[in-house]
Image (tube, rainbow, N blue to C red):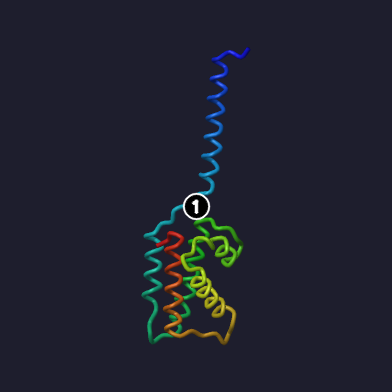
Amino acid sequence: MVDPGRMLLLVAILIVAVVGVVYLAFATKRRPILDQSKYQAHWLEIEHSVAKDNPASWQLAIMNADKLLDQALRERRFNGKTMGERMKSAQSTWSNANHVWSAHKIRNQLAHETSAHVTYDITLRALSAYKHGLKDVGAI
């Protein structure tokens, strides 16, 4: 027969082990919280860099917004080697995934197609998408 004291000790060890495993399972799945003031400051720089009469500022703003979102995805530890892969990993995070993907596609056109250009209105829509994406991941 097993000593009741030993049985109690074994049950206590088992409970502590189960609680530890559950804690580790949830702790490793949490994503880090971002420094919103840092991201907000960068975002305001991007917004203020857009000049209605300066098309070069439009492209630069889109490129910088894309980089800022990618930085947030990296800091939140979304999986993927490329931004596209990280965006797919964050798919359930987006409140409007098509909006964010459209903005990223515009950025890709600007980066890879020599004939690509954007209008002021397209720039504002892309920046709106990036802003919502940054809010969705908790950056701003």
Residue 5 vertical placement versus 50 (above, below): above
Q: Residue at x 39, y 61 (%)?
A: 38
Residue 40, by quadrant, is bottom left
Q: Nearer the viewer, residue 11 or 16?
A: 11
Residue furthest right as drawn: 1
Q: Is residue 64 left or right of residue 114?
A: left
Across and down, in percent, residue 140 comes to 39, 62
Residue 34 vs 43, above or below: the answer is above
Reading the image, the residue beneath label 1 is: 31
Q: Which percent across, then down, holds residue 61? A: 44, 76
Percent x, y of residue 16: 53, 30
* Identity of the residue drawn at 42% across and 63% down: 135
Task: Please name whichever residue, 130 or 116, is drawn nearer the observer in this view of the structure.
Answer: 130
Disc 1 crowd rating (10 Å Cα; few below 14, some 14-19, many 20+) is few
- The picture quadrant where one finds residue 18 is top right
Residue at x-position 38% and y-position 87%: 53
Q: Position of residue 130 (x, y in %)?
A: 45, 70
On the rendered structure, is 137 left or right of 113?
left
- Identify the image quadrant of the N terminus: top right
Q: Count the numbered circles shown.
A: 1
Side of 31 relative to 44 (left or right): right
Secondary element at image label 1: loop
Front position in the image: 95 or 36: 95
Amino acid type shown at disc 1: Arg
Residue visible at 54% across and 41% down in the picture: 24
